[in-house]
Image: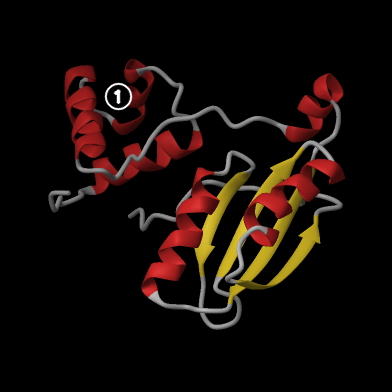
Amino acid sequence: MESIALDATDLQLLNLLQHDAAQSNQALAEQVHVSPPTCLRRVKRLHEAGLIERQVALLQPDKLAAVQGHGLACIVEVTLDRQGAEALDAFEARAVAEPAVQQCWRVSPGPDFVLVAHTRDMPGYLALSQRLFTADANVRNVKAFFSTKRAKFETKVPLALS
């Protein structure tokens, strides 16, 4: 990834895109006071530099639950028996390949990993835990926390806007 210098307009674009990446190039250009071609070039440069990883739709779980049934959100602390680079990499690779795992964090101190996962129900969590934790002889301890309410969910990274 190339090093990139960011000016106030770049930071404004990043902030606006974090809020709503579906807005048109014309709308973005108007908000940052540049021409649409300039805006398009800047956004493309931000993508190419890797500052914008990807653009996705954020689903509202409670509204989705009305359509397909409630899901189970959980935060799981995982401690491995051996913490060598190879063992950490192996567990991480399995966790990130698991569709139910939304986030995988290596952390320190404390557990080795914190996972955020979503399953359809408790039997779905049991199947996930058997695939990721029980089948891995290197997993020493698992501590799961099940969500009763999501009070805040944010994807925005704070930016130093002038």
**As drawn, is 73 to the left or to the right of 115?**
right
Neighbourhood count class around disc 1 (C-alpha, 10 Å): few under 14, some 14–19, many 20 upward: some
Q: How are the colours assigned in the image?
A: secondary structure
Q: Which one is in front, 111 or 6?
A: 111
Residue at 84% x, 43% y: name it. 123
Q: Which one is in front, 1 or 137?
A: 137
**As drawn, is 66 to the left or to the right of 85?**
right
Residue 30: where, in percent of width, then height? 33, 23
Check disc 1 and report the residue beneath it. 29
Callout 1 amino acid: Ala
Residue at 37% x, 72% y: name it. 85
Q: Against 65, is 153 above or below?
A: below
**As drawn, is 76 to the left or to the right of 67?**
left
**As drawn, is 43 to the left or to the right of 157?**
left
Residue 148: where, in percent of width, then height? 86, 52
Q: Residue furthest bottom?
A: 109
Q: Split into 4 quadrants, where in the image is the C terminus?
A: bottom left
Residue 15: where, in percent of width, then height? 40, 42
Residue at 39% x, 17% y: name it. 24
Q: Against 48, is 37 above or below?
A: above
Residue 20: where, in percent of width, then height? 49, 30
Q: Give SS at disc 1.
A: helix
